[in-house]
């Protein structure tokens, strides 16, 4: 004698043609006409930016980084050096097995070359 919640209701599938009609259509980059004066404008993104993001030191282990992603539910994590300067960003996709093995095979790291300031 289980609890009956009434008949099961199934939502109908939305056809692709219907979705195409109602989904907003954005212009392509080729459709945008910008004046040269517009190209020199700046936009202040500080109201929309996270001014205190979660970070991980560039010497942190993969295990610690993974644990931060899992426990905090992060989508990205800023990598900082000993001066707390951002030297990279790690995303969830970077911690997938294939991405990790590719990075290890290439011998890549996120430290910057101190002379050039470029990523190594």
Image (tube, rainbow, N blue to C red):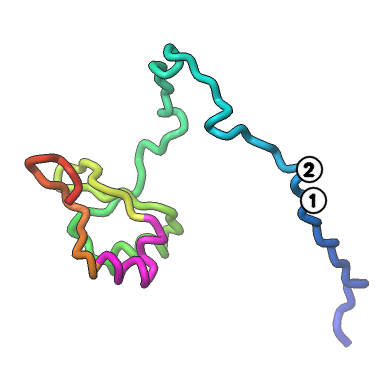
Residue under the image location 54 percent in, 30 percent down? 30
Magenta extent: 91-103
Residue 57 placement (x, y as % from top left): 22, 53
Residue under the image location 45 percent in, 16 percent down? 38
Q: Secondary structure at mark 1?
A: helix
The residue at which mark 2 appears reads as: 21
Residue 97 placement (x, y as % from top left): 36, 72
Query: In the rendered view, does 104 fall on the left or right side of 113?
Result: right
| Location of residue 91 (image quadrant) | bottom left
The residue at which mark 1 appears reads as: 17
From what the image shows, is residue 43 above or below residue 118?
A: above
Residue under the image location 43 percent in, 12 percent down? 37
In-front residue for pair 2/86: 86
Residue 48 placement (x, y as % from top left): 46, 32
In-front residue for pair 61/87: 87
From what the image shows, is residue 16 above or below residue 29?
A: below
Q: Are marks 2 and 1 in contact (CB under 8 Å)?
A: yes
Residue 60 placement (x, y as % from top left): 22, 61
Query: In the rendered view, does 49 fall on the left or right side of 12?
Result: left
Disc 2 crowd rating (10 Å Cα; few below 14, some 14-19, many 20+) is few
Query: In the rendered view, does 109 fall on the left or right side of 5?
Result: left
């Amino acid at each position: 004698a289980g609890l009956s919640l009434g008949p099961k209701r199934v939502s109908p599938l939305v056809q692709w043609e219907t979705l195409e009609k109602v989904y907003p259509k954005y212009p392509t980059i080729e459709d945008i006409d910008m004046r040269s004066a517009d190209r020199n404008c700046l936009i202040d993104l500080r109201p929309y930016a996270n001014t205190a993001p979660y970070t991980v030191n560039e010497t942190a282990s993969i295990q610690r980084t993974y644990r931060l992603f899992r426990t905090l539910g992060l989508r990205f994590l800023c990598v900082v050096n000993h001066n707390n300067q951002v030297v990279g960003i790690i995303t969830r996709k970077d911690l997938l097995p294939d991405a990790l093995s590719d990075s290890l095979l290439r011998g890549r790291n996120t430290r910057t070359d101190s002379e050039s300031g470029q990523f190594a």
